[in-house]
Amino acid sequence: MFGKQIGIDLGTVNVIVYVRGKGIVLNEPSVVAISRTDNKILAVGNDARAMLGRTPETIEVSRPMRDGVIADYVVTEAMLRYFVSKVCRRLERRPEVMVSVPVGVTTVESRAVRDAAVQAGARVAYLIPEPLAAALGADMPIGTPTGNMIVDIGGGACEAAVISMCGIVVSSSVRVAGIKLDESIATYVRRKYNLAIGDQTAEQIKIAIGSALPMEEEQSIEVRGRDQVAGLPRTIKLTSTEVTDAMSEPLAAIATTVRAVLEKTPPELASDIIDRGMVMAGGSSLLRNIDRFITEQTGVPAHVAQDPIICTALGAGRGLEHLPLLRRSLESI
């Protein structure tokens, strides 16, 4: 069966693919470049991301996934087909595929993901809730009758869930995550400095000096953009304190979501979570001091998983290995 089972984290920002027996084999941006003249796909993944904000009117570069769900079915199917065929080039049989989806997706949304995976070349496609996949990937003991809390902060959505006996007991999600953090930085720079910057520049600022809490030693970065008054290129200096202030609103929304789950958690499971703390997964959990920020906001210890970016893809792959145990949770999607 090795190599015939594939776990896919179909994210808003990245698509990560895990193949059983081989590990993570693909991690590329979920970006597609399309020709507007004949609707042909020109590039997918890294090649398409390099074109973001740099194309003529005849080429459209877009993310077919928004807030963790399919926004453009046709483009998502083409993107999935490209990635699955890239991974399965050497496979004789069509693979079993498990795709992660947000908690609380509608029947229409889940059918769209499943159909896209089958059309892309899967023999059979299962769907797994993202927090459950992230918890599996983070090696949490979710099969035991104890409370395990996971906070998955990706690119499009933040999902928090309490898991026990391979099932989600309580969950909550908000469509605020990495992309909203980038947007808040771009908005701040535009309002304070009258400087227009692109999404990629905002993301680079977040990675370079972004922090959920003020840093002990303030850092700064030079930012280049277009002056909105003069219309000419200009450079400014931005400090880490300013970036922290800029991100305060989306970070508060994330903390509110985590608190909402803790408030709804049954007392027995809540005591387990206080003892063990919560685990943070997803690319945006790499933001400096976000674990300390969540701990301050909730009073519950939070720590970041070992490989937060690949947790969900890893868990989706492992989900196929533990299919009999997970079947109850998967059937509810």
Image (spheres, grey):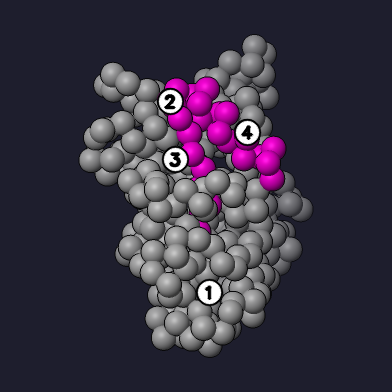
Kindly identify which residue carries mark 4: 112
Kindly identify which residue carries mark 3: 98
Residue at 59% x, 77% y is 265
Residue 328 appears in the rendering: yes
Q: Dot 1, crowdedness within 10 Å: few (<14), some or many (≥20)?
A: many
Say above or below: 194 vs 210. above
Q: Is residue 34 magenta?
A: no
Q: Residue furthest top?
A: 38
Disc 2/disc 3 C-alpha distance (Å): 11 Å
Within 10 Å of the Cα at label 3, are there few (<14), some (14-19), or many (20+) other Cα atoms? many
Q: CA distance from mark 1 to mark 3?
A: 33 Å
Residue displayed at 39% across by 32% down: 96
Q: Quadrant of residue 281?
A: bottom left
Question: Residue 239's x, y, as percent?
Answer: 53, 72
Cα–Cα span, label 4 and label 2: 16 Å
Taking the view exactly as shown, the residue that stands out farthest to the right is: 229
The residue under label 1 is 212
- Disc 2 marks which residue? 123
Q: Which amino acid type is marked by label 4?
A: Ala
- Provide residue 24's location: percent of width, then percent of height: 31, 43
In the rendered view, tell whether residue 306 sits above or below residue 313.
below
Determine whether the residue tagged by mark 1 lies in a helix, strand or loop.
loop
Q: Secondary structure at mark 3?
A: strand
Residue 109 painted magenta? yes
Start and end of the magenta stretch? 106-131
